[in-house]
Image (cartoon, rainbow, N blue to C red):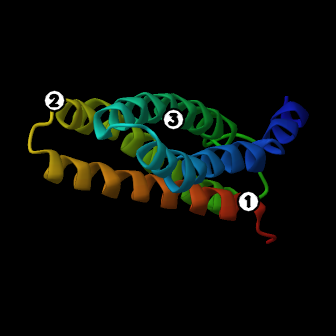
């Protein structure tokens, strides 16, 4: 069992890279391209909402797997690193879910659009930071 857990933990940097890389690609490339190239803001916004929803589930999937691989009691030579990692992963997953289920419906309904878009952008940026810190912590030596 310990060998299996150790081997699964070797996949952790890849999961964190997928999480952080997908957030980076979506936020820095894909969504801006939608707004630059689709005929109307409404079409771009609708498509962006669908992509952000898909990103939420990718984030949750990567985060849950990372949480399971580095849970307390899992075999690891670096328990302090794992505890700090768990905080960032858990926070990132919670931010993704908060964005999807609390903020996105307000944006879609165009309720105080400017405020909720800014809140959503801030939550996305914080999630990006959590994923980035998780990736960094999993790839640094020592």
Sequence order check, earlier mark of 3 and 1: 3
- Residue 15, position in %: x, y? 71, 42
Q: Which residue is mark 3?
A: 55
Q: Which mark is residue 25?
A: none
Label 1 Cα crowd, 10 Å radius (few <14 / some 14-19 / many 20+): few
**Front in this rendered view, residue 13 or 51:** 51
Q: Say if 17 sits above or below 103 in the image.
A: below
Comparing marks 3 and 2, which lies closer to the viewer?
2
Comparing marks 3 and 1, which lies closer to the viewer?
3
87 lies left or right of 94? right
76 lies left or right of 18? right
Toward the bottom, the furthest residue is: 142
- Residue 51, position in %: x, y? 48, 32
Q: Say if 118 sits above or below 9 in the image.
A: below
- Residue 48, position in %: x, y? 41, 36
What residue do we see at 16% from left, 29% from top? 109
Q: Which mark is residue 109?
A: 2
What residue do we see at 41% from left, 58% from top? 126
- Secondary structure under tag 3 reads helix
17 lies left or right of 45? right
Mark 2 → mark 1, Cα distance in angstroms: 46 Å
Sequence order check, earlier mark of 2 and 1: 1
- Residue 66, position in %: x, y? 64, 40
- Secondary structure under tag 1 reads loop
Mark 3 → mark 1, Cα distance in angstroms: 30 Å
Label 2 Cα crowd, 10 Å radius (few <14 / some 14-19 / many 20+): few
Residue 87 at least partly seen: no
Toward the left, the furthest residue is: 112
**Front in this rendered view, residue 64 or 48:** 48
Label 3 Cα crowd, 10 Å radius (few <14 / some 14-19 / many 20+): some
What residue do we see at 81% from left, 70% from top? 141
Q: Which residue is mark 1?
A: 78
């Amino acid at each position: 069992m310990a060998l299996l857990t150790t081997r699964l933990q070797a996949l952790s940097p890849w999961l964190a890279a997928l999480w952080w890389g997908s957030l980076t690609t979506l936020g820095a490339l894909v969504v801006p391209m939608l707004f630059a190239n689709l005929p109307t803001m409404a079409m771009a916004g609708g498509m962006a909402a669908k992509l952000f929803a898909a990103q939420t589930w990718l984030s949750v999937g990567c985060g849950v797997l990372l949480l399971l691989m580095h849970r307390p009691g899992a075999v690891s030579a670096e328990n302090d690193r794992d505890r700090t990692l768990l905080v960032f992963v858990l926070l990132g997953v919670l931010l993704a879910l908060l964005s999807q289920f609390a903020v996105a419906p307000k944006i879609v309904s165009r309720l105080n659009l400017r405020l909720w878009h800014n809140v959503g952008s801030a939550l996305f940026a914080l999630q990006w930071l959590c994923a980035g810190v998780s990736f960094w912590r999993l790839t640094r030596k020592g």
